Amino acid sequence: MPIAEKLGIIGGSGVYDLPVLTPERETLIRTERGVVNAELGRYSRDDGEELSVVFVARHGAGHSIPPHRINYHANILALKQLGVTCVLGTTAVGSLRERIHPGELVLLDQFLDFTSGRSYTFFDGGPEGVQHTDMTYPYDESMRHILIDVAEACDLQLRPRGTYVCTEGPRFETAAEIEMFAKLGGDVVGMTNVPEVVLANEMGLKYAAISLVTNYGAGLSDSPLTHEEVQEAMEQNQAQIGQVMSGLITRLAETGGEGLGR
Ligand code: HPA
């Protein structure tokens, strides 16, 4: 079956870290909303068909852009311009619940938005007119099911669903905020998935997100939170995320993307 899909990955490390991919080149993509550095790679099937994969580092080179200043619009537009059809976002999160432990992987299926003052849409009036995008199920269900399968096939433990609370950051939360988010139905907390998932939906991209729990939310553990702790946990668990990415790439390539978008 020919491969109709092109995969975009927004997250940490890139093409060079995944042995299933042949790196092609790094390129600067100019969009209406800014310039994005993208790494391109491909997975070659035995019959010569290829799946193209594009990596974008969400926080820029060297993790230099804080969550509230990320150019989410440019990242999504760059992927769209490159012909990407489905996107996997990877994120670090804190746990809002004692039963969700650091080191666990969670597939997101809903979000609660507690950001403020970000730019949330491509449809800001003007030539596109007024558009309201359905957000009932912001994360693509077909991608989520493929990811569940992929994790099972490589014996990786993963929580199949979770509600992501997005905060404005860059500060961490208060203990009271963490308690409130849990009461409202949140499972994990992070600072980047809104508006990323919203903009992907507006551009008609299938979007799934896998979160690595790097810590318990503020007040759920005895020690204060540090950025270093989050980064360290992310690095320690990068191999697990790489396994999921490789599994997804292989599955999309070998099936031609069968099962997606249904
Ligand atoms: N809060 C917000 N964002 C995060 C956290 C957290 O505890 N951990 C990783 N990203």
Image (spheres, rainbow, N blue to C red):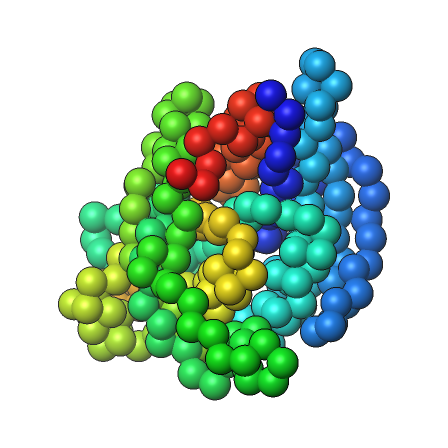
Res. 130 in view:
yes
Q: Position of residue 21 (x, y in %)?
A: 70, 30
Res. 156 in view:
no
Q: Quadrant of the N terminus?
A: top right
Q: Is residue 208 found left or right of 246 in the rendered image? A: left
Q: Position of residue 154 (x, y in %)?
A: 44, 23
Q: Is residue 17 found left or right of 106 in the rendered image? A: right
Q: Residue at x 71, y 56 (%)?
A: 81
Closer to us: 49 or 157: 49
Q: Residue at x 71, y 28 (%)?
A: 50
Closer to us: 128 or 204: 128
Q: Where, by quadrant of the figure, is residue 188 drawn?
A: bottom left
Give above or below for 32 relative to 247.
Answer: below
Q: Position of residue 148 (x, y in %)?
A: 37, 33
Give above or below for 100 relative to 47.
Answer: below
Q: Residue at x 68, y 19 (%)?
A: 45
Closer to us: 110 or 49: 49
Give above or below for 262 relative to 200.
Answer: above
Q: Position of residue 30 (x, y in %)?
A: 79, 65
* Farthest top residue in view: 46
Q: Is residue 258 found left or right of 43 in the rendered image? A: left
Q: Quadrant of ligand 1?
A: bottom left
Q: Quadrant of the C terminus?
A: top left
